[in-house]
Amino acid sequence: MSGGTERSAVARIIRAIPPDQESSVPVDGLPEPAAAGAVVTLLSAFGALAITTDPATGALRVRAATTTAALFLKSLAEYVEQNSAVLHNWSRIGTSEPPYDEQEILSGPQFLYFMERRRMSAFSDAAPLRSVRVSQVVVKRVGQLSGPEYLVMHDPAARQFQLPGGHARDGDQDASDVAVRELQEELPGFVFDSSIDQLIGLGIIDITAVSRSYGVSTRYQISFFHLQSGRRSLLAGPGGRWLAERDLLDADARVEGMTLNLAGLRKLDQTVAGGIACLPASLPRTTRSALPELARRKPLEFWSFVVGVVGIVLTVVIYFIQD
C-alpha cells in the first residue's frame, strides 16, 4: 500500500471504534484486521480505549473509554488522514514549568516529559531509558556580610539552575577532564591553571530523574568536585548566580522563579563529612570590602549609613564654621 492508502486504512480503523455509549466490537471485526490489533494496542497506551474480553469466545472487544476519549479518537483520525503531526518541535530540546502556552503543551519533549514522569511514578521497576556521565563542581565563597554562597549556573534548555558542569563528551579523558572543560566553557575568561587551581574529588552519586532537557528518564552518574583556587576573583558570567547556603540544599528553593537541579548535591551532602557546609571557600583570597557588599545586598541600610555619615560630617563642618 502507498503512504496515503496506509493512512486512510489507519484512519478507518480509528473511526470504526465505537463511542462509549455504544456496544463494544471485536478487534478482529474492525476494518483492516491485519493492522487493527496493532493500532488498538498503540491507542491503548493513550488510555482512550475500554478493552474487554468476550467470555464466550475469548476475543478482545473495544470501544472508546469515555465521551471525551471518543472525540479524541475522531480528532486523531483526522490528523492521520491529513498526514499532519499532533506534536512538534522534536528537534528542540528543553521543557518548562507551568503555566504552559499551546506551543509548549504540544512540544514533543514536553509531552515526553509528562509521559516519563508518570511512568516513573506508576511503576516501581521502571527503568531509565538513557544513561549519562556528568561532572559538577562546587564553587564556594564567603563574604564579610553575606556568609557562605555557592555558584549555580542557568541551564537554558532545562530552564533550571544547577552547579557548574555538564555531560562527558567524546575526547574527555576522565571526570576531572570534563569538570575542567565545563568550567572553562561556563566561566568567562577562566583558564584552568594547575599551579593555582585544584579540583578535589567529593564522590560519585547516582541519580535517576526525568531529564528537563530531553524529557526522558535518565540515570545520571555524577562526579562531584570542589574547586580550590588561589585566584583573587572569579567571574560568574550572565548565567551565574551566587546562592546562599540556606537555599543550596532546599528542594523547594527558587532562583528568579526557576527550580534548582541539585538532587545529586543533596544526596552527596549526606556522604561528605560534616556536609557541604564544612567545605572551605574556593577562593580564600577573595574578600569583599564591607561597604560595597552592604550596598549590593542591603541598599536601604547602605544609604541610611551614607546619609548618617554625611549628616555627621556636615554637623562638624557647620560647628567649626560658626566658631
Image: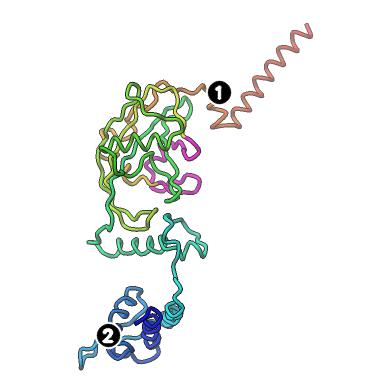
**Left or right position of 311 against 12:** right
In the image, what residue type sits under mark 1? Leu
Picture quadrant of residue 245? top left
Q: Is 203 or 322 nearer to us in this picture?
A: 203
Tag 2 and tag 1, C-beta contact below 8 Å: no
Q: Residue at x 22, y 61 (%)?
A: 125
Instruction: Name, please, the residue furthest toward the right.
Output: 322
Q: Is 230 or 193 nearer to us in this picture?
A: 193
Q: Position of residue 320 (x, y in %)?
A: 74, 8
In the image, what residue type sits under mark 2? Ala
> Which residue matches tag 2?
34
Q: Secondary structure at mark 1?
A: helix
Picture quadrant of residue 181? top left
Picture quadrant of residue 133? top left
Q: Count residues near mark 2 (Cα–Cα under 10 Å), then give few for <14, some for 14-19, many for 20+.
A: few
Label located before the other in sequence (2 or 1) = 2
Q: Residue at x 28, y 35 (%)?
A: 176
Q: Position of residue 51 (x, y in %)?
A: 29, 83
Q: Is residue 253 above or below residue 272?
A: below
> Which residue matches tag 1?
291
The region drawn magenta spans 237-260
Q: Is residue 253 magenta?
A: yes
